[in-house]
Image (cartoon, grey):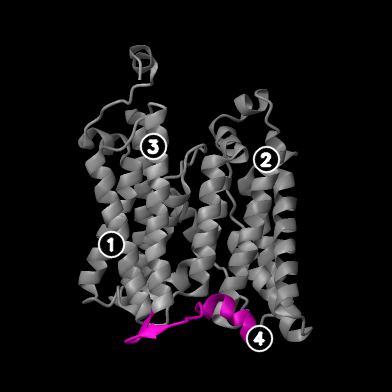
Amino acid sequence: MSVETLESAPRRPSISILDFVRHHLRDYGMLLSLFAIMIFFQWQTDGTLLTPLNITNLLLQNSYIVIMALGMLLVIVAGHIDLSVGSVAGFIGALAAILMVQFKLDFVSTTAICLLIGGLVGAVQGYFVAYPKIPSFIVTLAGMLVFRGLCLALLAGQSVGPFPVAFQHISSGFIPDFSTFDGLHITSIVLAAAVPLVLTGLALRDRSKRFRYGLEVEPFLLFIAKLILLFAAILGIGWQLSSYKGLPNVLIVMFVLIAAYTFLTRNTVIGRRIYALGGNEKAARLSGIDTPRLTLLTFVNMGILAALAGLIFAARLNTATPKAGISFELDVIAACFIGGASASGGVGKVTGAVIGAFIMGVMNNGMSIIGIGIDWQQVIKGLVLLAAVYFDVYNKVRR
């Protein structure tokens, strides 16, 4: 390499581990918080939290929250909010019950119809936000009331079920195992080992790209430590699950969606435009972005994911109930804000929303195991949410 080439190559900024963590406290703080909360409740529950059965229950209980958090993240990043997701999920579960239980429609057609209607619901709400410019808070508050009422009307105030066994497997089924050894599900272990390998490959590629363009990169020791912790956490959970029934089907659905939305937000034009929309709508519009259409698409996406979450929740309960989805929107919105999304829009990561969802899930599960009443659970979750938003505002002021 010539002297001219070396001089013209971009130089990578050097930064200490302490400075790097301080500048990225939003990312590392939530991850460390999740680990700390898990360790605390593992101690308080005498090891019950991380037993194979309870880990499986944690995944099943929080799957629909994680799925809706992915859609809510894009809505919040775009500078809006959706208060109707819990009611839409309950309405879709009720609709699925009517179609499958009363009209005997097969679960594949029912699923397709429900996802289509979920997208249509999102499109209607998104239209009122994007074009007449009605605040999303008002539109989705109205939607919350409308779809809660429609859920009650469809079910006539009664629970409807049970669902076909094939439909139940969406939530309560496990991936087929092709081999077992000493009570362990080998297929689950292999898949659990493959995930950190893939993530490591992607992390190395991203690090190499940042080196090539002279961008800031994690200090090497911090990078290696994070990969080791990632391997240990995923393999440990995979080993625990393999000793029970293996990997739940819904975990595969979550993983595919998380990977897809991570790619969407980080590597696509539409993903970058959503961040631009939330960061400064006027500037985004002047730069040629069709901001109303983009807003509409974020709500359509939210409607589809709320519908999917409603189907998974109904399949898990094996019945549709009039109270399904109540307060889901609070957990979903809290997951996004706890995971680092900014209330003013333009900031947030998929991984942060997922971490936030599991923080809420572990807290709910852990507090229930140690016997904290639902009243104090709500108080504690409210304080955690307030602290997360305060942390976000404090960081902005400090910068």
**In the rendered image of this protein, does residue 243 appear above or below residue 82?**
below
Say which of marks 4 and 3 sits in front: 3
**Cβ atoms at labels 3 and 1 below 8 Å apart:** no
Per the image, the residue denoted by label 2 is 294
Q: Earlier in the sequence, mark 2 or mark 4?
A: 4
Q: How many numbered marks appear?
A: 4
Q: Amino acid at mark 3?
A: Ser
Q: Which residues are magenta?
A: 163-185
Per the image, the residue denoted by label 1 is 232
Q: Secondary structure at mark 4?
A: loop
How far apart are the alpha carbons under marks 2 and 4? Answer: 38 Å
**In which quadrant will I find the C terminus?**
top left
Q: Give x and y (percent) for residue 239.
A: 33, 73
**In which quadrant will I find the N terminus?**
top left
Residue farthest toward the front in the current orientation of the protein: 1
Q: Secondary structure at mark 3?
A: helix
**In the rendered image of this protein, does residue 105 appear above or below residue 213?**
below
Per the image, the residue denoted by label 4 is 164
Say which of marks 1 and 2 sits in front: 1
